[in-house]
Image (tube, grey):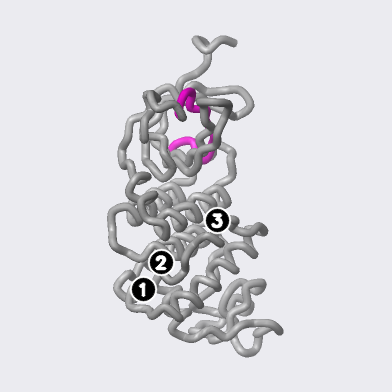
Amino acid sequence: MGVSTRKLFRDDAVVLRTFKLGEADAIVSLLGRQRGRYRAMAKGLRRTSSKFGARLAPFSHVDLQLIEGRAELHTVTQAVGLHLSGGAIAADWPTYTAACVIAEAAERLVPEDHQPDLDVFQLTLGAFRALAETDLPAVLVMDSYLLRGMKSAGWAPSLNECATCGKDGEHRAFAVAAGGAVCSDCRPGGATVPKPASLELMRALEAGDWANATAADPRQRSEAAGLIAAHFQWHSERPLKTLKYVPHQS
């Protein structure tokens, strides 16, 4: 089947990552509003004369026209920039590393099966724009994204009731394997006991309560970040490889 007979489709998508292909081409990992997560080839993307320019840089929001491909690899034919966040994000190391974690987490949250996930699409787009266009601390934006993404996927940590028995309350102990906060009756061996303020920060981040989230001190941010990362990695069953590059005191 020639290119002329292959199906064209459009989608607006967030660019998650790019991978080198040959001397001048690239594979682009995309999270689309209509098509979910998929990959596409961008011919000549790495040439300085590329018609795509910076529009297919990681973390950008673009309107795409693609040729539907074989073996789940499509081909980008047109790209119109909607929100080109990549340049602003890449200019600052803490912001860039937080965006890399968000992109990796998005790939974990949405399988590459062309099924739309509008919640995660909107979360990802909003997180990249927050990193590029606001003064919110990058690590807090990242941690808020991880919590909200887990909530959308159905495996967020329990913060307002016991993860084991469902008893309401702001319980002190936290057990990743159990699913979050646990009451004194259900507390397993090895559970941690974070500061109440750290759990309160997690609640604020999940709710998007930025006034309270940004008021947290560095110790609370660090402790909450550790719990969030541990929970995400345990329940997704793989480490977030880019997390080690994030400076957590930013």
Label placed on residue 17:
none
Q: Which residue is mark 1?
A: 213
Q: Is residue 245 left or right of residue 235?
A: left
Q: Residue furthest right?
A: 189
Mark with earlier residue (3, 2): 2
Q: Residues within 10 Å of mark 1 (few under 14, many from 20)?
A: many
Q: Is residue 132 visible?
A: yes
Q: State the image coordinates of residue 23 (x, y, percent, origin top left).
A: 55, 26
Q: Amino acid at mark 3?
A: Thr
Label whose residue precedes the other's in the sequence (1 or 3): 1
The image quarter containing residue 240 is bottom right
Find disc 3 in the rendering and name its residue: 242
- Choose top left, top right, bottom left or bottom right for residue 154: bottom right
* Residue on which the image places disc 2: 140
Residue 7, horizontal then vertical, whole percent: 50, 18
- Quadrant where the C terminus sits is bottom left
Q: Which residues are magenta?
A: 33-45
Q: Quadrant of the N terminus?
A: top right
Give SS at disc 3.
helix
Give 227 or 118, whichever is nearer the viewer. 227
| Residue 137 is one of the magenta-drawn residues | no
